Amino acid sequence: MTTEMLPNWLKQRAFLTPDRTAVSSDERSLTFRELDHEAEEAAQRLNRLLDGTKPAFIGLMIKNRIESIIAVHAVHQLGMAAVMLNHRLGAGELTFQVRDMALTHVIHDEDFAEKANSLEVEGISLSLLFTGDKRPYAPKDHTNLDDTCTVMYTSGTTGSPKGVLQTYGNHWWSAIGSSLNLGTSEKDVWLCAVPLFHISGFSILMRSIIYGMEVRLHASFDEDAIDLELKSGRVTIISVVTNMLQRLMGRIGDGYHENLRCVLLGGGPAPLPLLQACKDKGVPVFQSYGMTETSSQIVTLSPEYSLSKLGSAGKPLFPSQLKIKGAAAPLEEGEIMVKGPNVTMGYHERPEANEKSFEDGWLFTGDIGYVDEEGFLYVLDRRSDLIISGGENVYPAEVESVLLGIPGVTEAGVIGMDDPVWGQVPCAFLVTDRPMTEEEIMKGCKAALASYKCPKKIVFVGELPRNASNKLLRRVLKENMLKGIYDEA
Amino acid sequence: MTTEMLPNWLKQRAFLTPDRTAVSSDERSLTFRELDHEAEEAAQRLNRLLDGTKPAFIGLMIKNRIESIIAVHAVHQLGMAAVMLNHRLGAGELTFQVRDMALTHVIHDEDFAEKANSLEVEGISLSLLFTGDKRPYAPKDHTNLDDTCTVMYTSGTTGSPKGVLQTYGNHWWSAIGSSLNLGTSEKDVWLCAVPLFHISGFSILMRSIIYGMEVRLHASFDEDAIDLELKSGRVTIISVVTNMLQRLMGRIGDGYHENLRCVLLGGGPAPLPLLQACKDKGVPVFQSYGMTETSSQIVTLSPEYSLSKLGSAGKPLFPSQLKIKGAAAPLEEGEIMVKGPNVTMGYHERPEANEKSFEDGWLFTGDIGYVDEEGFLYVLDRRSDLIISGGENVYPAEVESVLLGIPGVTEAGVIGMDDPVWGQVPCAFLVTDRPMTEEEIMKGCKAALASYKCPKKIVFVGELPRNASNKLLRRVLKENMLKGIYDEA
């Protein structure tokens, strides 16, 4: 018996606690027995649609719906890995991912039919998994922790997006690490209003199966609806990003129901005044730090330190570790490195990136931070240049690459600009070989990028700050902007 | 990064939650920081006592004291596996284990000095770990889940005792499987009044480190003291065997504090009237099934079924599985087989027993049972013939082998006899080649066996029931006894 084999998670959960609620939304709810049954039926239909073939990877372009969760499980029951596609991406971006993963099929929500059909794949409408003929298959007895479960794309600052390979083991250890920190109770209900195709949402699905816990699924982050849930005592845990927490705090009133025991805050550093306001209202915020590569949070502030270490992301989860590259003593700043069984084995077919991203089993996160004397992590910068806009990652290199593809643009630098609604929005600095208009630039961007990635401000400049190796210095760009150097440009 | 490496458990726990209580007794208590510090100091002293050598295995003959827990951690920090010796065994039995493991050193409680010094090893008094010179060593960064953590002896029905190898991974998965079933809370305190050298007690130590949970340690099962603890709300979970639960229920009065959320009942099947009485008093009993080979319980009755499935041992823990050998349908009886990452890889240097005990990764438990239509396990017999006396396993084959060594005894059969105090006590049926007295027999037994293993009743008979292969049929012996067939003997 190796430790890499566990019972088939979904079947085991349906066997152990068949009558517990697995997932609920405003429209319907399913017990684990029902979820397993629905997933089994959907898997048989998908098996017929695939005509008995079994690609290693299959794309999913889904919304936060119970049917999407059934589809994810169906894919896994058939032994395929799910490539979680972000439906907000443009056709060009999605085509890159489709080609990179050599996808042949994408299961898509009915509403994304047009986008899916524009890709070089066979689109399978989600609704087809719930009607029509079936083709039986032999479900696996076991879940092999070394098998790839999901792929999610991230690009970091190094250019083209990379598919992060997440094994069942990565998700397992993430869920277990989280449970050892937050505790688990059969009374827990975890509200998911973050996207299922992001690790923030997907990890809730995994915890649901592993813990035997209800997921309360919301189609999107509707602050009125979520405010009601948190006040009703219906849920005990919720995952949020800073922007969501800000919107909630705008209407909190007297506070939430005492059943709410954890507000898990991820997706980048939170402003101290917000954390202070949460503290004043008795909102149990758990700051955390993590990324797609760590299969959800890897560092979280434990209950007993949530007040005394306000602003820190906390300490690693039990199975994981962190260190600051090059730091010889506490408080020294440097690149954050992480290690643990929840950390990805690497990127899909990116030997060079994999070589550069790991050192003796430690992952370079690209983020800057320090640890205090007691070992609490403080994250200074969410990656050096990453822009987080409304909880979505915007990678400057990717936007720059589109800008540089517009005739006339010779140099491009993209940085984040503070925004009262979205936290940050992209701002582009351009050098052009002839006079150009904002309209020309925006047209080029919109053709290639999701709207949240399109620059909200465009500044034409004479030159961009670069280092000796001619590498763009986005940090200097940011400093110059704050100093007002580009105000007349 | 392989999944087999985790941070050094004790160091990680002391780093993550230094100020939580790790263990307390009536005399003292230690936080995790203090426990780590004490273990570190003890390890350095032990390192000096061992003169820098590092045997793979070291014996421990300990009582339920905080100092014993420190010693266990010291041994592990030095990278040695702990052979947990049962101090109730006779010198001959202990000598067998010492030789079988090729032990050179045994760390022993001061009270066991005489017994330890009678063995062919160097005895190290526990007190030496807390005073005297130290010798530094390099603590391991990691806990390797494949490394052997502990060895505990068991004999089953097949003759000489076997050392069950328990890896860190076995203990880890056991703790995690338990947490996914029982839930975990930072408020949990687990009362340990079962022996630390048994898996029942030792597994609580492992959960303490892994969960960050307080162990409330009792030197022994003093029902008055434990009754007080359960009524005070000081503890939330307690591990008991049937005999302990019976003694507690004799004085429960109105019931226990509502903080007591789990009474984990192991060590053999419990009588239904006892379970019914617990139910009536609102005592949250979780029946369970497990053995040394499964590193604690592997099957437990989940909260939601504790009433409707009274008498069942429940369903497997999430990472584990069970099946009934040869059963084609529910309710069919057969040998219980188990599988999972908490199950031992095998017995120390017993290739033949290892060959016989496993089939495709499944362990033959030797126990008979069945599962109902919903998959709940019912254990019919705690191994075919095993006697459980006051929570201690008494293996008939072992007692028989001593009896057969007494001059004049030609055949011996040992079975359990119901006893109001100990649950069961051994009863011996003997064929002799000349008239003998009980006194002669008892003298021979006492010279070779711990007193709890000595037969409490001796019956001289003309012949013993045997099958065609001349194998003793203990089951028939038991049936005959119940029918009164031996009453005149």
Image (tube, coloured by chain):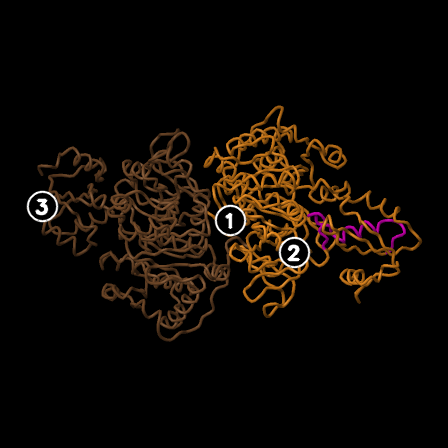
Chain colours: A orange, B brown
Picture quadrant of residue B297: top left
From the viewer's perspective, tell me whether residue B41 is left or right of residue B267: right
Identify the mark nearer the N-term, 2 or 1.
Answer: 1
**Dot 1 lies on which element?**
helix
Q: Which mark is residue A273?
A: 2
**Dot 2 lies on which element?**
helix
Q: Is residue A451 magenta?
A: no
Residue closer to the observer: A435 or B267: A435
Disc 2: host chain: A
Q: Are marks 3 and 2 on the same chain?
A: no
Q: Nearer the viewer, mark 2 or mark 1?
A: 2
Give how far across and how far down residue B453 sits, in percent: 21, 50
Q: Which mark is residue A179?
A: 1
| Residue position marked by numbered label 3 in the rendering | B433
Of all residues shown, which one is farthest toward the front? A254
Q: Are marks 2 and 1 on the same chain?
A: yes
Of all residues shown, which one is farthest toward the left? B435
Name the residue at 55% across, 45% down: A237
Give how far across and how far down residue A190 sits, in percent: 56, 42
Q: Is residue B357 above or below residue B34?
A: above
Residue closer to the observer: B269 or B399: B269
Q: Which mark is residue A233?
A: none
Quarter in which the C terminus of chain A is drawn: bottom right
Magenta-highlighted residues: A386-410
Residue closer to the observer: A484 or B116: A484
Are circles 2 and 1 on residues that touch, CB within 8 Å? no
Disc 1: host chain: A
Of all residues shown, which one is farthest toward the top? A132
Are circles 3 and 1 on residues that touch, CB within 8 Å? no
Are circles 3 and 2 on residues that touch, CB within 8 Å? no
